[in-house]
Amino acid sequence: MKKITLLSLALTFIFLSSNISFSQRYTAPSTSIGLGLSGNFATNDFYGTSLTNSGNYGAIWGRGINLTAKFGLGQKKSSRIVVGAEYNKMVNSYDKNKTPLLMNPVAPHTFYDIIGGAVGYEYVFRPNCDDRQYLGLLFTTNMISAPVYNSNYGEIESSTRFGLALTGGFEWIFGAQKKWGLNLGMKYNFMNMFNASNSNTPGNINLNDGDGLGGPGFKRALGMFSMSVGLNYYLGQMLKSGK
């Protein structure tokens, strides 16, 4: 967690201290559509190396895919409305293949499927330049489930949790008409920030992350830190007058 915090602070400093560059021939785009792949790291009580510790969920690494649309506001398009969807799989192998982006964990292992959606606000630094940075805050919806062969709690029915995510990243624009860009982004998602629940359902099918009656007796915070790389397609950029 300390490493994640330091990385977030370092990236934030880079965003805020970036040198002002010359404006490009094109205005900032009004819309961007991005497709990316992500590598994930479980945080808070979602993280755990043991598959039998009831105090956490035994997840470590994961991978995912995301689709994001961004809509610029105002004349400069420094502010953007963000709408996104993603799918992530989080895994942990008991004693083998404990490596990032784990693809073939060895049983016993944990598996968690997370289908997510997000909507929020993003601020873009130097929006009409070929290299730009952004910071954002998103409200997230996270549908978390696990199959019957999940070693920690067994099967978990799809449980919807509402959270908050802090995002940031870089965009590098290329092409003569500035229609394409490479995106490198990061996100910390507190997946169950606004709701949680417990249940005595036989077989531990409920996610059981709340602090109410019937469950483990305390709330578990489910967090996930992601780094993603992807391709953006831009719409609505125009040649500046007089260029």
Image (cartoon, helix red, strand yellow):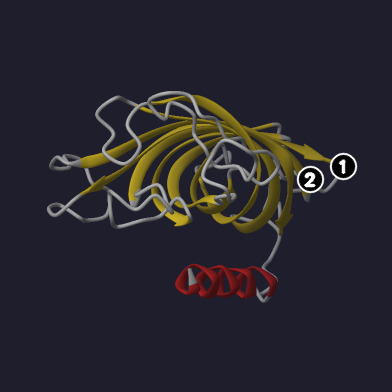
Above or below, 131 relative to 31: below
The answer to whether any part of residue 128 appears in the image is no
| Mark 2 closeness class: few <14, some 14–19, many ≥20 residues within 10 Å | many
Q: Tell me the residue at 56%/69% (across/down).
A: 11
Q: Position of residue 192 (x, y in %)?
A: 61, 43
Q: Decide if residue 210 is on the left or right side of residue 22.
A: left
Identify the secondary structure beneath mark 1. Answer: loop
The residue sitting at the right extreme is 74
Disc 1 designates what residue?
Answer: 74
* 231 or 236, nearer to the observer: 231
Q: Is residue 132 above or below residue 80?
A: below
**Residue placed most toward the observer, 19 or 206:** 206
Q: Position of residue 87 (x, y in %)?
A: 45, 31
User: The residue under label 2 is which amino acid type?
Assistant: Lys
Q: Residue 98's image quarter?
A: bottom left
The residue at the point 39 percent across, 49 percent down is 54
Left or right relative to 30: residue 109 = left
Name the kind of residue labelled 1 in the image: Gly
**Kind of element beneath mark 2:** loop
**How many numbered marks have been drawn onto this rendered protein structure?**
2
Q: Which residue is mark 2?
A: 77
Residue at 50% across, 42% down: 175
- Kindly check if marks 2 and 1 are in contact, taking CB atoms under 8 A apart as contact: yes
Find residue 191 and report its horizontal and vertical position in percent: 58, 43
Residue 55 is tagged as none
